[in-house]
Image: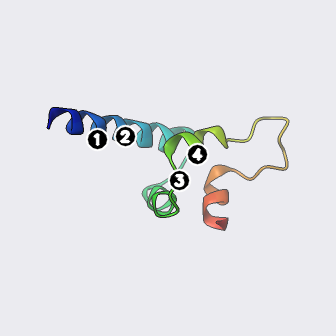
Amino acid sequence: MAKSKQQGSTQDRQWALAKRRCRLDQEDIRMAKELGLKPHSLIKNIPSQNQQWKLPVKQWIQQL
């Protein structure tokens, strides 16, 4: 039982990190979860300076 609570809190921390780093709001997080995306996939899709063609994560989620 304690392990499942620990995994839940770890998952919550990962979503909070993705929310902060990707500048998302709660609605964007809800849409990402419904699409089956994981926090790590959101973070790794943050565009870098030399990826001007890439949409910001918030717009990318909304476009999906």
Disc 2 + disc 1, Cβ < 8 Å: yes
Q: Which x, y percent locates residue 53?
A: 85, 50
How much space separates mark 1 and mark 3, taking CA atoms? 16 Å
Q: Residue visible at 46% across and 58% down?
A: 33
Q: Say whether disc 2 or disc 4 marks the residue closer to the N-terminus.
A: 2
How much space separates mark 1 and mark 4, taking CA atoms? 18 Å
Q: Residue visible at 50% across and 43% down?
A: 39
**Residue 8, label in figure:** 1
Q: Nearer the viewer, residue 3 or 41?
A: 3
Q: How many other residues sit within 10 Å of disc 1, few (<14), some (14-19) or many (≥20)?
A: few
Q: Say whether disc 4 or disc 3 marks the residue closer to the N-terminus.
A: 3
**Residue 37, label in figure:** 3
**Residue 42, label in figure:** 4
Q: Which x, y percent locates residue 23?
A: 55, 46
Asked if residue 43 lies left or right of residue 34, the reply is: right
Name the image colouring: rainbow
* Rendering quarter of residue 21: top right
Q: Residue visible at 74% across and 53% down?
A: 55
From the image, tell me which residue sits under label 2. Answer: 11
Which residue lies most toward the left here? 1
Asked if residue 37 lies left or right of residue 59, the reply is: left
- Quadrant of the rendering where the N terminus is positioned: top left
* Rendering quarter of residue 6: top left
